[in-house]
Image (cartoon, helix red, strand yellow):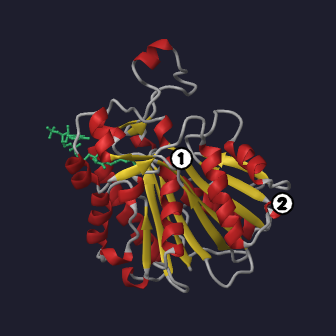
């Protein structure tokens, strides 16, 4: 606007978007995942807090989860998952141009875990950064990589969701400690692939829910001190029941928006890969959307909730296990702290 023109009296709203308008078609070229060897099952949790295997299985669908060994960090899991994805994509580490790590449990607050992963994988020509939006991290990282490759800033990207939830879990809090596990999942994205096409992303945040899932201390407003450690404020706290309700509506809203704006119906989607937070959340959302469970990927019984790793871990297992087939329309859907939620549509 030039200085001569008067400012508009009211702001006009943007028209609703239709499907993605893209410069270059970007696709997933390979996936990989990794989890620590150590298994923490429900029987062991019964020794730590006042809970039972029956309660955990009935209320969550979880039977066991994986926990890192002392000294094992996010970058170790991320590098293992990333290596498998690169092998499947047939991309040499030195040809990787961008590494995005979705995590809120980095190796250390500084530097970025992307730097540790770059070093471990030998990606000698890569840029990289971490992205933090909890369980919706992988969907946001995939969208970011898709955009940066589509405009040509990078020719490919290694996108990894990784979480060491055991480092922020309070094993004295039965409301939350039964839920979480550690893992990583990865995808290599690039161009010139006849399969794995990324079609669209829908992502949202709502800061009115910041208190529902949070780590109270350790950031700039409440740095760690002895009192806060005493109060166990370095650990994650969640309001499970409220998050449960939010999660079911978030999945339904974002999946409905995705299919509507791409001119699809629920029946057109061959496979849903939801965030694995609670089997009852997944089943309730599927029932409300009219999706039969044999189109839904579920591996929660073996890993629990692995936050940013959950969707790419489930995607990798489903793709390698043959549940996702060439040509399938696949919808990834995630939700979590923030509050945040989002979905990705792709053609396998
Ligand atoms: O990825 C995003 C983060 N994920 C989440 O925030 C998870 C979302 N929420 C959930 O998955 C569920 O709300 C939970 C699994 C956390 C809890 O399940 P629920 O069916 O919502 O249980 P509730 O919180 O309503 O608790 C029911 C009862 C309570 O006892 P009273 O008040 O009925 O006597 C709890 O104290 O179950 C009790 N309880 C437990 N009992 C045995 C809570 N945790 C446990 C436990 N073992 N571990």
Which sits in the foreground, 291 or 66?
Answer: 66
Q: Earlier in the sequence, mark 1 or mark 2?
A: 2
Residue drawn at 67 percent across, 71 percent down: 88
| Percent coordinates x, y for residue 108 in the rendering | 64, 34
Q: Secondary structure at mark 2?
A: helix
Residue drawn at 45 percent across, 43 percent down: 207
| Percent coordinates x, y for residue 198 in the rendering | 61, 74
Which sits in the foreground, 91 or 220?
Answer: 91
Q: Secondary structure at mark 1?
A: strand
Residue 180 lies in quadrant: top left
Which residue is label 2 attached to? 94
Left-right relation of 87 to 31: right
Residue 157 visible in rendering: yes
Query: In the picture shown, does residue 157 fall above or below 129?
Result: below
Q: Which mark is residue 348?
A: none
Residue 11 visible in rendering: no
Name the quarter where the C terminus is drawn. bottom right
Q: Please state the quadrant of the image where ligand 1 appears.
A: top left
Which sits in the foreground, 66 or 5?
Answer: 66
Which residue is label 1 attached to? 163
| Percent coordinates x, y for residue 281 in the rendering | 30, 58
Sort mark 2 into few (<14), some (14-19) or many (20+) by Cα contacts within 10 Å: few
């Amino acid at each position: 606007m030039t200085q001569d023109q008067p400012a508009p009296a009211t702001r006009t709203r943007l028209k609703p978007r239709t499907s993605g308008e893209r410069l270059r078609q970007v696709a997933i070229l390979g996936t990989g995942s990794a989890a620590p060897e150590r298994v923490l099952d429900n029987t062991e949790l019964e020794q730590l807090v006042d809970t039972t295997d029956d309660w955990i299985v009935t209320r969550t669908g979880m039977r066991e989860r994986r926990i890192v060994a002392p000294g094992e960090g996010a970058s170790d899991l991320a590098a293992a998952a990333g290596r498998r994805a690169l092998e499947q994509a047939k991309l040499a580490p030195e040809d990787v141009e961008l590494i995005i790590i979705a995590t809120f449990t980095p190796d250390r607050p500084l530097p970025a875990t992307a730097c540790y992963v770059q070093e471990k994988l030998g990606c000698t020509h890569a840029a990289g950064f971490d992205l933090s939006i909890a369980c919706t991290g992988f969907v946001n990282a995939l969208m970011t990589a898709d955009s940066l490759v589509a405009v040509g800033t990078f020719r490919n990207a290694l996108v990894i969701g990784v979480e060491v939830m055991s480092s922020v879990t309070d094993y004295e809090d039965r409301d939350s400690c039964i839920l979480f596990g550690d893992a990583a999942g990865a995808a290599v994205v690039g161009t010139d692939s006849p399969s794995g096409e990324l079609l669209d992303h829908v992502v949202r945040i709502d800061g009115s829910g910041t208190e529902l899932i949070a780590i109270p201390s350790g950031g700039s407003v409440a740095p760690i001190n002895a009192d806060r450690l005493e109060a166990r404020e370095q650990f994650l706290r969640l309001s499970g029941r409220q998050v449960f309700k939010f999660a079911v509506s978030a999945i339904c809203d974002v999946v409905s928006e995705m299919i509507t704006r791409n001119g699809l119906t629920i029946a057109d989607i061959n496979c849903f890969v939801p965030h694995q937070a609670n089997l009852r959340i997944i089943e309730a959302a599927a029932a409300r959307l009219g999706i039969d469970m044999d189109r839904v990927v579920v591996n929660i019984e073996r890993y629990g909730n692995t936050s940013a790793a959950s969707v790419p871990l489930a995607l990798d297992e489903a793709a390698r296990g043959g549940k996702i087939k060439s040509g399938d329309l696949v919808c990834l859907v995630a939700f979590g702290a923030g509050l945040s939620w989002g979905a990705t549509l792709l053609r396998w």
